[in-house]
Amino acid sequence: MYKSGQRQHAYDNKDISLVENNGLLRYPSALNFYDRPPQFDVTVEEFETTAMDRLRVLAEIESSLARNRTWEELKTATYNQYMKYVPLHTNTYDDTEEERRKDHLGHYVLRLAFCRSEDLRRRFVKAELTLFRVRYEETEAMDREHFLSSRDFNWIPVTKEEKVQYNHGLYSMYHAFRHEQDRADAFEKEKFYKVKWTRVPDLVEKRKVFLKGGWAYVPGREQSSIVFKEFEVELERALETTARLIPRLDEDSRLIPVLDNLSQGFVAGVASEWTNATEPGSSGEIRAEMVDDLAKKHFPMCMRSLHENLRRDNHLKHFGRLQYGLFLKVLGLSVEEAIAFWRKSFSRVTDDKFNKEYRYNIRHSYGLEGKRANYPAKSCLQILTPGPSDVGCPYRHFSSENLQTALLSMYSQQGLKSADLPEIMATVDAGHYHVACTRVFEMTHAPHGVAKGEGIGGGESVTHPNQYAARSMELAKVKNEDDKMVE
Ligand code: SF4
């Protein structure tokens, strides 16, 4: 450990988890304070995909915080997500350089995307700090020690003499021990560090430090609080600096759309994309006449709302039709059944008009006309951040009053009660729309054994309307089979 003023490396008060080797940056530790920007070439594609992957991890963290998960649950969810998208292994792993480079780049791209408003900065710092904390706890003790000793945290080890001098005050922090001997042993073994008390406000508030002459005496077991606070303060400062410099980037027409897209994804809070959005569902073939019943029992609010508009007006405008049509395609409606479904739904349109104006578009969305592309159904991210003519997500785009009325009218038959509304609306008001949708899924599927926090399965939040419907249909199928076994 390095005392204040001592330096292991030439970088002035800067991160030495990055070192230079023949001009190349190297990453000796999995933990990074991101003090130095990446200094390597990247393609625009890598710039975007690397940031998208990190965004998935941060959005999962936001979602966990919004869902009041315990620290252990949050840690597991975050660990699983980052090992999937931005894995970081300890030094015994072969490809650590590549992983750490990706981690470094992703962090910096998101800084650019999220420095532009105070709200985005606050959310970004909170999510990044949580990610750092999870990684800090998951990192092997040796790696963590190496990281701590490689960086100057400006803490001063308390000498033996000082420990004796303030024996009474320091010892008083060990009141949690039941047996006097255990308490004395723990105190004896403990190392203390002192820092200015303003650097550890959380420990001061929880009375976990001894205060003397403006210094906080921090026990070794609470050392991580200093590290986390430093990470937070440094990142806040860096984001403000980046915000002042960002107008210069506005001239770069390649990067600005990418950054806008990333910040929109974060605002929508969508963690990851469901990947089956081009394939028809596994629920078996859906026939046109089944759609009314499926909509009532299994559709998320966005699709349920489109379905009800269709039934009310016997019509849907182009973008609504496209969105709903692709959803039904992925759900398992074949092109013949889709033509039958839309033909019957547009009851005020003549056969001639239908064949001329609508049939082609339906076949087109199935990849049978025009470019013959396999168009995917829209994800929550796309629906939550719609273009000017798209249809949005009710949790985000309905007024509070309309949303509550619609929720009760659509889902009370599945067990949603007025008493559930305050919790859903609080989540909506906090801007966590897909978390509100996930809670509605949990509430309406409680009779199928879905518990609070379980989400769409394994704690995952809803990220795609088809994922919602497919899981709902799967749960109903399992319940039917179970019921049959009991009979
Ligand atoms: Fe639809 Fe997603 Fe909104 Fe739920 S969160 S209503 S699935 S867009």
Image: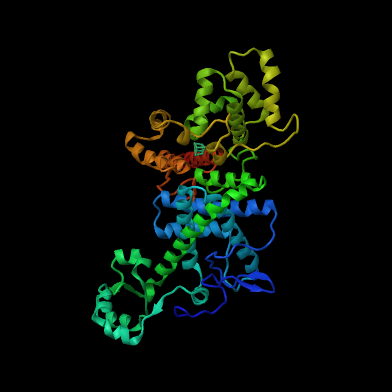
- Residue 461 at x, y percent in the picture: 49, 46
Q: Furthest residue to the bottom?
A: 161
Query: Taking 67 as reference, is 385 left or right?
Result: right
Of residue 82 and residue 465, the one placed in the foreground of this image is 82
- Residue 175 at x, y percent in the picture: 25, 74
Color style of the picture: rainbow
Of residue 380 and residue 365, the one placed in the foreground of this image is 380
**Quadrant assignment, res 280:** top right
| Quarter containing the C terminus | top left
**Quadrant assignment, res 181:** bottom left
- Above or below, 219 against 309 in this view is below
Instruction: Mark yes or no: residue 447 visible.
Output: no
Q: Residue at x 34, y 34 (%)?
A: 417
- Above or below, 458 against 412 in this view is below
Of residue 342 and residue 385, the one placed in the foreground of this image is 385
Of residue 136 and residue 469, the one placed in the foreground of this image is 136
Counting labels gives 0
Instruction: Mark yes or no: residue 307 visible.
Output: yes
- Residue 208 at x, y percent in the picture: 30, 69
Q: Residue at x 62, y 19 (%)?
A: 343
Query: Taking 32 as reference, is 72 left or right?
Result: left
Q: Residue at x 55, y 28 (%)?
A: 291
- Residue 169 at x, y percent in the picture: 25, 77
Query: Taking 368 as reference, is 215 left or right?
Result: left
